[in-house]
Structure formats: C-alpha cells, structure tokens
Amino acid sequence: MPNKRISDPTQLQALIDSILLIEADADLDQLLTMITEQATSLAGARYGALGVLNEDGTRLARFITVGLDADERARIGRFPTGHGMLGRVIVEPVPLRVDDLSTQPDRSGFPENHPPMTSFLGVPVRLEGGSVYGNLYLCDKQDGGPFSDTDEALADTLGRVAGLLIDKARTSLQARGATLAEERERMARDLHDTVIQRLFAVGLSLQAAQKFDASEEVRQRISGAIDDLDATIREIRSTIFALGRQAPGAGVSLRREIFEICDEVTQRLGVDVSVTIEGPIDILVGDAAASHLVATLREALANVVRHAQSTSAEVSLHVDNEGLALEVLDHGIGVDESGSPNAAAPGPNGHGISNMTMRAQSLGGWCALSASPKGGSMLTWYVATLNGELP
C-alpha cells in the first residue's frame, strides 16, 4: 500500500507501522486517532481531523481532531456534519489541496471560537475502488508553505488505511449483531412454541375441572388461577415482542422502523397504537440515538401491554436540531400524583424505566413517567444528542 511517490525511509516506516494497525485488536476510535496523529505529524500540519460518515452516508457520525486541546474543542461546540470543503471531499472522493481556504467559494466558514486556518489538504477515507467512509484532512503547514505532492501521497495512503479499519470494525459489528439477533429469535420461538403452549394446556385443564362438582371456594380458586395464567401469557407475549430488533433494520429507514414496531404491537399484542412523527427524523437522528430510540419504544410499548391494562396507546415523536422527544401515552390504569403506580402500572423505579432513563442520559437527556391529562399514564423520553457514537 505505500505510495511510490514516498521515498523517505522514515516516512515509509511510519506508513508501514500504520498499515500494521489493521490487524491490531484495539478500539476503533483509538486506532483512528493514531492514524490522524500520524498524518498530521508526517505532513507537518498544525491541525488534523478525521470524519467518519454514518451508515447511510448522509452526515458525519464521528469526528476526531488533532491539534486542539479540550478547552478549544469545547468552545467550538458541535462538530461539522460534512458540508463545505469537507463535503466536497466526500462527494468527489479524490485528494484536494488548497493554499488559502478563504479563496474557496464553497467553504462553509468557521464557527465562532474556531482557530483560523489557511492551507488545506483533504483526502477521502475509503476502500480501494469502493465505499467512501469519510474524510481525513490537514490544515496549516507549520512552515507556512502549501502542502506538497508527498504530503498528499502520505495522507491518501493513511486515508485508505483508515478505510480498512472502519470496514473491518463494521463487518465485525454486523456479525455480532446477526448472532445476537439469531439468539433473540431462538429465545422468542422457545417462549412461544413451548412455554405458551404448555400454559394454554394447563388453562384448558383447569377450565375442564370447573365442570366437575366442587365447592364455590374451589371454583373461585380455579377461576383465579385461570386469570393468572392469562396474565402470564400476556407477559410472555410482551417479552417476546421486547426481544425483537433493538436497532433499525438494515436498509430500513428509522421512520419506517417506528411504524413497523407500532403495527407489530397492534397485530400481535392487541393494543391499538397510533403514531405521529414530526420533523426530519431520518436526516437528523444518528445511529446511536436511533438504536436507543428503538429500544426505548419497544420497552415502553411492552410496559403498556404488561402493566397499563390499556387497549390503545398514542406514540408521538418530534425531532429538530435541538433534540428528540418521544411520548408514549396509554389509556390504562395510570399512575398517582407522585408517579407511583396504581395497581400494576409501571412505576418510576422499575427496571424498564431505569433502562430507558439510562439510555436517555447517555445522550444528554432524561426520562419521566407521569399521569396523563387524558387518563392513564404518559412516558416522556427526551435526548439532546442526535449524533452520538455507538457503544
């Protein structure tokens, strides 16, 4: 992979060391940071950055910087999403060199508190002849001059190394996800085909036993046992539902995934769910936030089935540049003024609420369960970070 335009032995050795990272068993962000640092150092740049596109290639989901300390990074605020010069390297996946950024008509400008930058070198992060995963770019030669052909060759080679690292990590993640999905499906089949069928059989036997001469007390106990079995079957069915996909399916938009989940509840669990979505959810919500949203929606609807004793629910989603808000309202037995459950309604201290709260907090948000003004209960789940990274 070392480029023929690179003849300096020190630079060649540095490239070989970087290529060996492909086989390293380390965190992807750590490896990409090492690549960015190597590119910045070899090209003699003051600043370097590596942006990684999300799975559908619409915006940057990761953004690694070199040359900025933590305070400088915090003052700049949100990282770029892939417009201007950065987007140009992604759309036209060829190296780009500019001596003075201020002369470029398609530059999108720097945010407030961003250090001034003049010279620019950008290369695509990609596989050879294949997918573009993002971009690697360097700014401001420390000697004050423009970036050279050798600098471009070094950065281009390291961009390809980064592409191989990202491809390897995503392939591994997909394999693990497929294995986990298969295990969940197996568990769901076992619960449905074995446990529920046995419970049905026991219930039928108890119903038959009611026909025999018995005291009123015995008949009441049998009736109570049948009711308990019915409740247990509902619980198992909601668990089977919760074992479903925990992240948006491959090739399926997040909007469509949400509608499919709600349709599944209506068809399989007998709760009529209406859905309202406001805002460009497929554009603004990144992979991590989408994964947490899908898992939270499943948990919330499973709780409606398990605890709320409601035959209908309303799901509303609103997303904009400030964040994402999910509300799940049911028309069941509700919660009291303190948020504690009436009878079996889900309380704020249950595992389901705790899980949903932790998911929201990991994205800078919060989760709350309250009494609904329409009767029943309302779960509100809000996150401020829409482009967080997957764990």
Image (cartoon, rainbow, N blue to C red):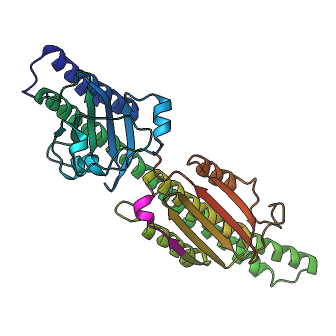
Asked if the magenta segment contains residue 56, the reply would be no
Side (left or right) of 148 relative to 182: left
Side (left or right) of 115 relative to 259: left
Residue nearest the viewer, comparing 103 with 87: 103
Vertical order, 156 against 389 (above or below) = above
Residue 252 x %, y %: 38, 65
**Picture quadrant of residue 8:** top left
**Picture quadrant of residue 13:** top left
Which residue is drawn at the image coordinates 57% and 54% (left, top)?
Answer: 383
Residue nearest the viewer, comparing 78 with 279: 78
For the N terminus, the image quarter is top left
Vertical order, 150 against 375 (above or below) = above
Which residue is drawn at the image coordinates 73% and 74% (left, top)?
Answer: 309
* Residue farthest along the front direction in this orientation: 103
Residue range of the region highlighted in magenta in the rendering: 276-285
Residue 70 x %, y %: 48, 30
**Picture quadrant of residue 164:** top left
* Residue farthest along the left direction in this orientation: 4
Which residue is drawn at the image coordinates 54% and 67% (left, top)?
Answer: 318
Residue 227 seen in the current view: yes
Side (left or right) of 51 relative to 217: left
Residue 28 seen in the current view: no
Side (left or right) of 199 relative to 62: right
Residue 128 x %, y %: 15, 42
Residue 28 x %, y %: 37, 35
Residue nearest the viewer, comparing 122 with 171: 122
